[in-house]
Image (cartoon, grey):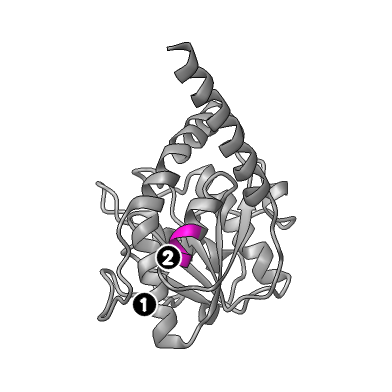
Amino acid sequence: MSSILAFLARWLAVHLTATLVDGLWDERRRVDVVVVLGAEVFGSGRPSRRLLARLDAAKAAHDRGLTPRILVSGGVDAWGNSEAAVMRDVLLENGVDPAHVWLDEGGATTWHTARNTARLARQEGWTSVAAATHWYHVPRAKLALRRFGFREVTGVHTVRPLGLGQIRSVLRDCVAFYWYVLRWYPTSAPGAPVGAPSIATAAARPPGRGVLTPGGPEAHTG
């Protein structure tokens, strides 16, 4: 029993070290699109701090000229809130040009986001992508995007908000990463994705979704 625990401890240490290196290192290369992976939206439609932090990271990359467009991807929760629509609204309210924001409401999981991003990339001729998400999620998101056909994949990470919830998420992603290594990926994905992405517009967006921090993701404290 002790040898098994020792093995698991060594595996966790190696995996976390690799995740830290990959997740915290942003290559900051110019890419065709930054895709923001969804996170919790409250029943009222207000974005969580985790979601705002991911949007901070994507907007900072866009503002630095690292990408001409942002794809927001998420599912629809039990209250009918679209994570992608909420993210779009936050970006538009914080000064991002509507023509630079793309919407995918079929990204209920990391796998679905990667699939839909790849399908849209084939339609639009995109060849490079950056995943905007939390540092511990970056390796799994990059893995899924590569498995769906992207050859140039980078990460745009955030570390906030810190707390016990992030520890749970780190441990969850340690297991989920290997599930993504083993799971099936179609070599081609013809047809429109569920919740087909479309260019977002500023029309009829609810006010007050959230305020992003001008300094980017590391300055976000809300």
Say which residue label 1 marks.
Answer: 119
75 inside magenta stretch:
no
Q: Earlier in the sequence, mark 1 or mark 2?
A: 1
Residue at image position (40%, 55%) is: 110
Q: In what element is the residue under mark 2?
A: helix
Part of the protein shown in magenta: 143-147
Identify the residue at image location x=61%, y=60%.
155
Task: Tell which residue pokes out farthest to the top in this image.
Answer: 2
Q: Amino acid at mark 2?
A: Arg
User: For mark 2, does the 10 Å Cα neighbourhood hold few (<14), some (14 to 19), or many (20 or more) residues?
Assistant: many
Residue designated by label 2: 147
Residue at 33% in and 73% down: 187
Using the rendered view, name the quadrant where residue 68 is placed: bottom right
State how far apart marks 1 and 2 are (Cα). Answer: 13 Å
**Residue type at the position of mark 1:** Arg
Can residue 198 be seen in the rendering of this structure? Answer: no
Residue found 36% across the figure and 77% down from its top = 119
Q: Does dot 1 land on a helix, a strand or a loop?
A: helix
Q: Is residue 189 visible?
A: yes
Main SS, magenta residues:
helix
Residue 112 falls in which quadrant of the image?
bottom left
> Where is the N terminus found, in terms of image quarters?
top left
- Packing grade of label 1 (10 A; few <14, some 14-19, many >=20) is many
Looking at the image, residue 53 sits to the left or right of residue 200; the answer is right
Residue 188 lies, with reference to residue 137, above or below; the image says below
